[in-house]
Amino acid sequence: MLGHIYFLIKAHKKNFPGRAVVSQVNDPTYKICKILTDILNPIAKNGQSYVENSYDLKQFLGNLNVDEYDIVALYPSIPIPKALKCVRKKLLNDTSLSDRTDLKTEEIMKLLEICLETHFKTIDGSILKQIDGTPIGKSISGPIADIFMIWFEEEYVLMLAMNFSHI
C-alpha cells in the first residue's frame, strides 16, 4: 500500500501554512525505517547544538528575545548523497554502534538507500516518487537531517566561529 498525503497546519506560523506529510505507516519499508531510526537517533542527538524540539529551545534560550528563525523545507532540501556520506562517517566512528545493532555499517547504509529510494505517494490517483531530499513522514528522515546538519554545523558554523575567535 502506498502512503497517502495529508497536511499539518503550522498553527505557530503566521497565516497558518500547511506542511505536506506522507503517512508511511503501511509503506513496505516502515519497519526497517523504525529500526534504522533507533540505530541513528543516538548519533543524531549528539550534535553540539542539538535540541529535541522548539519547547526545549525556548527553555534553553530562557527569556532571551530573538526573532523567529526557521529552516524552510528542511527535509526536502537535504542532499541525499552528501547526507548518506555524513551518516556513513558517523557510523564508522561510532564506538557504541555494536551495542545497538548487529548490523554492520555497509548493511545499514544499503538499508538506508532502499528506504530513501522507495518513497512513493498517491495524489489524485497518480503515483508519484519523491526525488529530492528526505521524505516528511518517514521516521528515518529526522535522524538523517540531524546528522547532515551536524556536519554542516561542524564544517561551516563552528569552523567559522573558531576562525573569527583568533582575530
Image: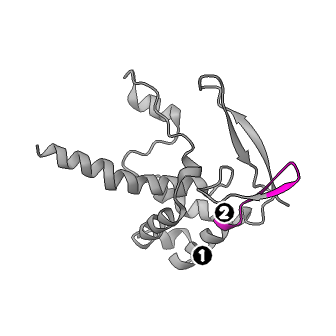
Residue 119 relative to residue 107: left or right: right
Mark 2: give few (<14), some (14-19) or many (20+) Cα within 10 Å. many
Task: Left or right? Give the position of 47 relative to 125.
Answer: left
Q: Give the range drawn in magenta.
A: 116-127
The extreme left residue here reads 167
Residue at figure coordinates x 66%, y 60% from the top left: 34
Q: Is residue 139 above or below residue 115?
A: above
Q: What secondary structure is marked by label 1?
A: helix
Which numbered disc covers residue 110?
Answer: 1
- Distance of mark 1 from mark 2, alpha carbons? 12 Å
Q: Name the residue under label 2.
A: 33
Residue at image point 76% right, 50% down: 23
Name the quarter where the C terminus is drawn.
Answer: top left
Q: What element carries label 2?
A: helix
Left or right for 47, reference 112 = left
| Residue 2 position within the rendered picture, expressed as x and y whole percent measured from the top left | 82, 59
Label 1 crowd (10 A; few <14 / some 14-19 / many >=20): few
In terms of depth relative to the viewer, which is nearer, 81 or 158? 81
Comparing 152 with 138, the one in front is: 152
Q: Position of residue 96 (x, y in %)?
A: 45, 68
Q: How is the image coloured?
A: one colour
Residue 54: where, in percent of width, then height? 52, 34
**Which amino acid type is marked by label 2?**
Cys
Give, as a three-letter code, the residue at label 1.
Lys
Front residue of 54/10: it is 10
Residue 57 falls in image quadrant: top left
- Quadrant where the N terminus sits is bottom right
Residue 86 forms part of the magenta stretch: no
